[in-house]
Image (cartoon, rainbow, N blue to C red):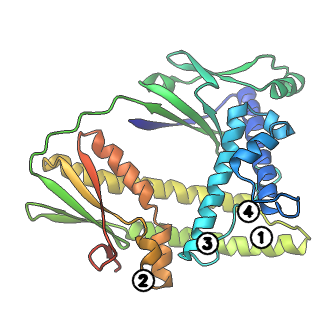
Amino acid sequence: MLLTKKIIYKPNELELNILNSMAFSSAKLWNIGNYEKRNYKTLGFSEFPNWYDQKKRLKDNFWYKNLPSQTSQDVLNKLQKAWKSFFELNKSKGIKNPKPPRFKGKKDLFNFTYLNNGFKKVSDDTIKFSISKQQKEYLKDKYDFDSKYLSLKIKYFSTIKGNIKTIEFKPLKNKKYQINVVYEIEDVALKDDNGNYLSIDIGISNLFTCYDNKGKSFIASGSKYLEISHYFNKKISHLQEIANKQQIASGKKYVTTTKRINNLYKKKQLQLNHYYHCVTKEVVKYCVTNNINKVVIGDIKGIRDNAKLGSINNQKLHFLPYDRLYDLLAYKLLREGIELIKIKESYSSHSIHVE
């Protein structure tokens, strides 16, 4: 089972300079790859460049070489996934005028990830991370840092009991970083079928409508998600409209988001993540309390493309992160030995509830 440990870390001055240098390189590499994708015809490419093409072609690029090779490949892979999401949304017509992935700002920092061959745990609380040769030369000249590795001693590393797969560094404000450690632990054995079941119908305002086979039911409301999304989307849209007009008036070819807008996106995501955890935790708690060992939930894949619920509700369906909720619910239930079973269902008034 894969789990994620999130650590908020305030590095010292030298550590911050090193992390920022790599995060800056990550943002620049994103922009290089994004420019190719946006302008592939003008650049003379015969087809839209995919991740595999870009990682080979850009391996000698300055910003690519500023990061460990697999870290650079991961940046380009994130970009590929962002474009894939854009194409899918554009094809499904579930969201009106979806925007392609944007460029990072001139001074922006961006996430970067170490795969398991790019770091080594040298003690319970210390992990050392490899630094590319080019980055090492820059750090030596700029900060008199002469090492092939960045060693971070963080007490929370000692709480991770499993095989670490990846470590992502996400720049935050106030000179802090969120470190996302993905690690693997042994799967918990599933409990035996005891005849107690929970069925979950998926909706919008009522996100999860849950029924057990003893006749009890409860609702995990989706109204909080809609409130958070509406509040932040309205503010972001207003500020982005202003920023777009200002940047176009100044002759800028590609508009970018502002620092204020980026902070709103981050606040929105933090609040939504908290909501996702609360909703799924409520379901798991009910199952444990009522000795339920199996949960059945409808799989809405494909339903959103075919559902005729009106443009507003179609957009709500496409924005709701059902895959994220499935994954959270599955892993939380599995930690209790409870099995989550997806069932295919065609669109009907019973499979998607629009209130």
Q: Nearer the viewer, mark 4 or mark 2?
A: 2
Work out how far the residue at label 3 is from the one at label 2, CA to CA, in angstroms: 18 Å
Kind of residue at badge 1: Ala
- x and y percentages locating residue 350 in the rendered image: 26, 76
Callout 4 secondary element: loop
Judge the density around disc 1: few (<14), some (14-19), many (≥20) Cα neighbours within 10 Å: some
According to the picture, the residue beneath numbered tag 3 turns out to be: 90
Work out how far the residue at label 4 is from the one at label 2, CA to CA, in angstroms: 32 Å
Work out how far the residue at label 4 is from the one at label 3, CA to CA, in angstroms: 21 Å
According to the picture, the residue beneath numbered tag 4 turns out to be: 257
Work out how far the residue at label 2 is from the one at label 1, CA to CA, in angstroms: 33 Å
Judge the density around disc 4: few (<14), some (14-19), many (≥20) Cα neighbours within 10 Å: some
- x and y percentages locating residue 270 in the rendered image: 51, 53
Q: Which mark is residue 243?
A: 1
- At horizontal 15% and vertical 48% (from top left) the residue drawn is 289
Depth order, front residue of 12/34: 34
Callout 2 secondary element: loop
Judge the density around disc 3: few (<14), some (14-19), many (≥20) Cα neighbours within 10 Å: some
Q: Nearer the viewer, mark 1 or mark 3?
A: 3
Work out how far the residue at label 1 is from the one at label 3, CA to CA, in angstroms: 24 Å
Q: Is residue 266 above or below residue 156?
A: below
What is the quadrant of residue 247 in the picture? bottom right
Kind of residue at badge 4: Thr
Work out how far the residue at label 1 is from the one at label 4, CA to CA, in angstroms: 7 Å
Q: Is residue 109 visible?
A: no
Callout 3 secondary element: helix
Q: Nearer the viewer, mark 2 or mark 1?
A: 2
- At horizontal 38% and vertical 49% (from top left) the residue drawn is 328
- At horizontal 30% and vertical 72% (from top left) the residue drawn is 351
Total label count?
4
- x and y percentages locating residue 338 in the rendered image: 23, 44
